[in-house]
Amino acid sequence: MVIRGPAGIGKSTLLAAAATAAAAQGIRVLTATGIQSEARIPFAGLHQLLRPILHLADGLPRRQRAALESAFGMLDDPDQAPPGLLAVGLAALELASDAAAATPVLLVIEDAQWLDESSRGALAFAARRLAADPVVMLAAVRADHADSLGDGGLPELELAGLDEVSAAELLSQQAPDLEARLRDRVLAEAAGNPLALVELPVALPDADVAALPSPLPLTDRLERAFAAHLPGLPAVTRAVLLAAAADDEGIPADALRAASLVTDIEVSGDAFTPAVAARLIEVGPSRLRFRHPLVRSAVYQAASWAQRQAIHAALAVVLDGEPDRRVWHRAAAATGPDEEVATELDDAAARAERRGATATAISALRRAAELSKTTASRGRRFVRATSLAFANGQTADGADLLRAAGSLELSSGDRLWLSYLSEAFSESGWSGVAKVGAIAGAIDPEYGRIALTPLLSVALRCWWGNPSGETRTAVVRAAERLPLPKGDPAVVAVLAFADPLGHGADVLSRIERAPIVDADPLGMYHLGMAASAVWDYELTLKYVEPAVQGLRAQGRAGLLPGALVTQAWAAVHLARQRTAISAADEAYRLGTETKQRQWLLGAQLAKAAVAAERGEQQTVDMLTREAEAALLAAGANPLLAMVQFVRGRAAMVTQRYPEGLEHLRRALDPGEPGYHPFVGYWALADLVEAAMQCGQPALARHYLELLESLAARTSSPNLRAQAAYARPLVAADDQAEELYRLALDHELTGWYCLRGRIQLAYGRWLRRRHRVTESRAPLRAARDTFDALGFASVAEYARQELRAAGDASQRRASNAWDQLTPQELQIARLAVDGLTNREIAQQLFLSHHTIGYHLHHIFTKVGVTSRSQLHSVLPQAT
């Protein structure tokens, strides 16, 4: 739960009460406090929280242990890929879960808005997964701060001020001798804020309280109240307070050494005594703590710019052995451009990036750019920061950095990269293909592999957009000019996306010759995406399924949503609904967490497509309406074609042919907002059938001719299968039966949904020609096919035809597996594959206790008592 409220409202008091109650019950309490000056130290907050249980990390799986060690700077290998933020979050979750195996754990986080961004992201990820673990997380957040904990979908408790009676009672306890006029003024100014009621009458002289201007925010009034103590303190005390306020660790010895440097005298621990007496700080053997964060802020803000600069310079000397802390103090002390400090910040950014703390790396590069001596070095640093921001979903930061870099002197390579970033992450949403040709033309072969990222991006624009043939050719030529092997997965993907019609057959040939390399999940992902782009879905799954496993193992949650959506849609086309639902459900969850809206919507529409095949019209309507609203808000978007495809399939499944024709034709109509021929080709066989059922044979033949042409040109298995299904629907009676038999005997093997549909169509064709006895066999086969696929609506149509043919047919018995949620089905499959709970947890970014919890429910639902029995009841994917 997130406890939200303004400064001084009592968040810390409430958390302290919870921690005391928990400790009294034998619950282990782990705490962390966000410190504003510490916000640039990678994973500092997470390390502070988990430090007492880090010894348990030895029991974590190797990848999770390595993720934590890298995040905490305990392992710094420049050759090792940085851990993903979600991988660190999962490791933290498992560590807390393991600690809770002995005794329940309470995690208490104060001032979470000032934790470093990497810690906040990892903790939000873990918090959303505390389902079955005996772990509670409570975090306090300032009401006026947005943060990744507060916007992470967690339960929130909003704290309001005290009511008038309670406020008056508290003020009477704290200042019983306060005269009536000032008492009324303090009550009015405090507005029920407990800290204000305690501090305002004590910290300020009466005249100052009365003179406080009402428009001043309460936080500023409290800071002034605390700052009022400072002039009466000795100079050395003010110096150590400023050093402590500017530092992040709160180590008394560091504050004393820094104060000694700026005052030129040896400052002893006695300097703390007046500040302790004034109730500004508490000092322990190894830690100094400000009584409230506003005290720290008041001390820092009360100092002059020159005093702050001097104390930062002194702290940089004191922290000479800690480069990550030292460099930020040097940067704060800089008075102008300083290339030496900028270079140190470059190094700090590289270390932060290796630790998976991209937010810190971006901040370091931004500050390095500000301190750069030349516009060229400033531009280079801004471009690098911009790349990191966009690559990690920080689009707001990325847009600011993009504008800052755009006006600077840049090399041709940096200018190209900036153009790519500007186009790929356009703030206006879908921006089409206007700049694709220019970016492709600017790619120099000397860039080598680094050019593949912008090239893949513009190639994707070609697939999803409708560029000219010249533009497609420019992208293909740019890929072919690169000094890379013809079978390079990324090059193959560029060809597939840029020109699937012109290079479809060549792409399929290159993919068929490519090996599956488990050590290269990104390469397999590219090959799977390429196969999907040219409508070969068996080949898509061949590469994407191991790619998903590899990306999971590497903790690359940023890439997983795209791989899972590709897997889900390939499974939709192959009628493997359980695979489709599991993949789409996980993609939706990860797309939400990683804020990748395009994959989130793609997953939602894949779910809708399965619902369409099942005849679940309400679900189709709800999911497509939500997706359409989001897409229209972003401007013209090619995903609108997928909305029409899903709606069209839903209409076809329930035999509403005019409606199906209306929806499906829109993807092939250039005048429609959802015009997208490559998606439109998914439904050409449906268009043939709908046109025939609507009495428009000429239109049906038109669509069949287009389908035949495309199938021949691209060698796409999906288009060939669609053509085999569509031919008998249009053929004359003396030719239709041979085409039905040819489709069933040879051309639709493996295409289960199309095969079931052709069985149903053939049975109907026979029955309507009074060959009733012959019609029963294909109708029974259709019924059994759709029962096996779980497509109840179409199976019922087959039963109706069977009854009309004089053959009774019972309803399909309900399957216990149909009661499982998509996530439960996914867990059950992995358990059947022999994975342990902890191995399943790593793959699905959950704790192993949560996996055990889900398995218990799975056993109950399907009527087994152990995981070994799952083998006998789990159906195959097909």
Image (tube, rainbow, N blue to C red):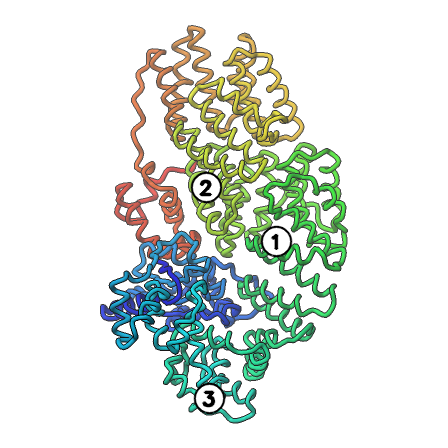
Of residues 29 and 759, the one nearer the viewer is 29
Badge nearest the viewer, 2 or 1: 1
Residue at 69% from the left image edge and 53% from the top image edge: 417
Position above or below: 316 against 561 = below
Is there CB contact under 8 Å for labels 3 and 1?
no
Q: Compared with residue 338, is residue 584 higher up or lower down, i.e. above or below?
A: above
Tag 3 secondary structure: loop
Q: For marks 3 and 1, give the one nearer the viewer.
A: 3
Q: Is 715 or 554 nearer to us in this picture?
A: 554
Q: Is residue 718 left or right of residue 623?
A: right
Residue type (three-letter) at the residue carrying disc 2: Ala
Relative height, residue 692 to residue 200 (above, below): above
Q: Which residue is mark 1?
A: 399
The residue identified by callout 2 is 584
Question: Measuring 76% from the left and 58% from the top, which residue is drawn there?
Answer: 411
Position of the N terminus by quadrant: bottom left
Q: Residue furthest left?
A: 25
Examine the rendering and report whether any part of residue 676 can be seen.
yes
- Residue drawn at (56%, 78%) of the image: 304
Relative image position of residue 631 (x, y in whole percent)? 53, 37
Dot 2: few (<14), some (14–19), or many (≥20) neighbours within 10 Å? many
Earlier-in-chain disc, 2 versus 1:
1
Apparent side of residue 852 relative to residue 662 in the rendered image (left or right): left
Q: Nearer the viewer, mark 2 or mark 3?
A: 3
